[in-house]
Image (cartoon, coloured by chain):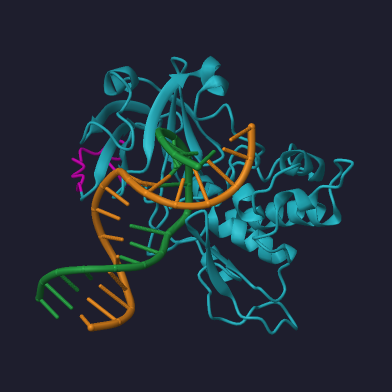
Chain colours: A cyan, B orange, C green
Amino acid sequence: MPELPEVETVRRGLAPVMENATIQELVLNRPNLRFPFPENFANIVQGQKILSLGRRAKYLLVDLEQDHVIIMHLGMSGSFRTVDGSTPGKFHHAHTKIEAHDHVVFHLKLSDGGTAQVIYNDPRRFGFMLMTSRNRLDQHKMIRDLGAEPVGNALDADYLAAGFAGKNAPLKAALLDQRIIAGLGNIYVCEALWRSGLSPKRKARTLVLKSGQPTARAVLLVENVRQVIQEAIAAGGSSLRDHSQTDGSLGYFQHSFAVYDQQGNPCPKPHCDGTISRIVQSGRSTFYCPRCQS
DNA sequence: ATGGTACCCTGAGAGC
DNA sequence: TGCTCTCAGGGTACCA
């Protein structure tokens, strides 16, 4: 389900359950997702306390007390749900109902004495779980090349100009490149470009002056990337195809889509009489208004 | 190095 | 009903 706002929403849903809980048992219902699970995965994490649940780009980071970090990615169809176990003082046997594509179950002992299960479900299995040590996290293959967080101090127009300089790739592809800005995906790239009035087909280098300075368009694009991500996080992300958050509730940013999945609809920009169209770039759908995006 | 394509996998929905 | 086709919020391997 996940671009950055959806992953951040998952993190916020899971954190109150997972943080300070102890992993009593880790159940793996198959040997791999996209990649094989780490060697001795269950043995290593069982008995460890979770210090915090973090996020970098679209990755969830489970910080364990013995310096291990579990690196989790949801791919296209990964989701988590939590199931309450016994509450303190009660002897209630939690009957966890395992459903199709439930690949990983964290059995947790909570800080308040209760129990809970956190279940990872992923029909397409493009997601993965890897592990490293805390002091090597920044050097990890999946983390080391990630660019700036869209909502963070490192991202500004100068940074974007440096990343886009000389790039012949279209803006759509450049914004999806996780080495420049990390965490954007197909939805929010389309939305940010529409908000900026920029064509997804425009070459990335056209937002950079010969001097290397950002153009006014670059300044605008950075601002819109920041805003659309902030708004989406505030809305609890986008819920497509009935995907729900960890507590079963739905994010609602999908109701704010101006262009994503809106082909054939009128452009919502005031005084624009264009029609949203769908094209394919890098093998993926791009939605934009050919009238007001150039 | 850079940019484009094929591919990993399952399920939902459209059209016949 | 059931078949076939396309498409899906991601990233990587491989090609020119």
Magenta region, residue range: A80-98
Q: Nearer the viewer, residue A8 or A164?
A: A164
Looking at the figure, which quarter contains the C terminus of chain A?
bottom right
Number of marks present in the image shown: 0
Residue A207: give x, y in percent of width and height: 79, 51
- Is residue A264 in view from this perspective? yes
The answer to whether A174 is drawn above or below residue C4 in the figure is above
Residue A65 shown left or right of residue A101 in the figure: right
Q: Is residue A85 magenta?
A: yes
Percent position (x, y) of residue A8? 53, 46
Along the horizontal axis of the image, is A31 left or right of A193? left
Q: Does the magenta segment cover residue A157?
A: no
Q: Residue at x 37, y 51 (%)?
A: A77
Q: Magenta stretch mostly in which secondary structure?
A: loop
Residue most extreme to the right? A211
Query: Residue at the spot x=31%, y=34% of the render?
Result: A106
Q: Residue A202 in the image: x percent, y percent?
A: 70, 58
- Left or right, A231 with respect to A33, comes to right
Residue at 32 percent of width and 17 percent of height: A44
- Is residue A121 something one can see in this rendering? no
